[in-house]
Each structure stands twice: as C-alpha cells, then as structure tokens.
Amino acid sequence: MSARPEPLPETAERSIVLTEDLHARPASTLAQVAAAFASSVTISYGSRAADVRSVLSVMSLGATGGGSVTLRATGSDAPEALAALGAVLGA
C-alpha cells in the first residue's frame, strides 16, 4: 500500500500600492493581524522581502507611500490572510 502524498499548501499573492510609509505603527498592526492566521506571509518591496510577523524586518524594507509591495501567503488560510493584511495596508 503506497502512502498518499501530502496536499500542497495554498499560495496566494497580492500587490498593493502603499498609502503611507511602513513605519512602526503599520508594521506592528501587520504583525498582529498576521499572527491570527496559520499561513506564512512575506512582504516584498523592491528586491527585499520580510516575514510579516517581524515588525523590525518589515520596517527595514524601507517601503514608502506610493510604492508597491507584494504580499505572498502560503498555507490553508492564505486568501483570508491576504485579504486581512490588504485591508490594513489600505487596499
């Protein structure tokens, strides 16, 4: 009897134009919202990426208002995580 392969986790991606800089307050809010989900979420700005759950990593991206970031979530609740994080970023 052969073992069934594990299903691949769901991956979702969303690009957002920032309405404000990703300074301490919005980075903290992103981390708090991301913590409510099982999915792993990264945010990319330019050539840099960070785990959304790390406030300092998000702030170190240097993302500024008017710039575009990409959120990528992998896990069972990826679409829901992206929707919630997009709402925090004003999209």
Image (spheres, rainbow, N blue to C red):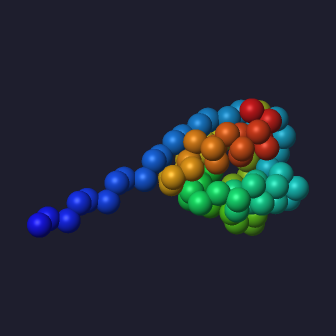
Which of the image's four quarters has the N terminus? bottom left
Which residue: 52% across, 42% down?
Answer: 12
Image coordinates of residue 78 in percent, x first then y, are: 56, 48
Which residue: 57% across, 57% down?
Answer: 39
Q: Nearer the viewer, residue 53 or 7?
A: 7
Q: Residue furthest right?
A: 25
Q: Residue furthest front?
A: 1
In this picture, residue 56 sits left or right of residue 24? left
Image coordinates of residue 66 in percent, x first then y, are: 77, 33
Q: Is 35 drawn above or below residue 69 in the view shown?
A: below
Kindly tell me whether residue 5 is visible in this rendering: yes
Q: Nearer the viewer, residue 75 or 42?
A: 75
Which of the image's four quarters has the C terminus? top right
Q: Residue furthest left?
A: 1
Quarter of the image holding residue 51?
bottom right
Q: How many marks?
A: 0
Quarter of the image holding residue 56?
bottom right
Which residue: 23% across, 60% down?
Answer: 4
Q: Is 47 drawn above or below residue 16 in the view shown?
A: below
Which residue: 34% across, 54% down?
Answer: 7
Image coordinates of residue 80 in percent, x first then y, are: 63, 44
Kindly tell me whether residue 49 is visible in this rendering: no
Image coordinates of residue 11 in percent, x first then y, are: 47, 46
In this picture, residue 35 sits left or right of residue 11? right
Q: Nearer the viewer, residue 10 or 28?
A: 10
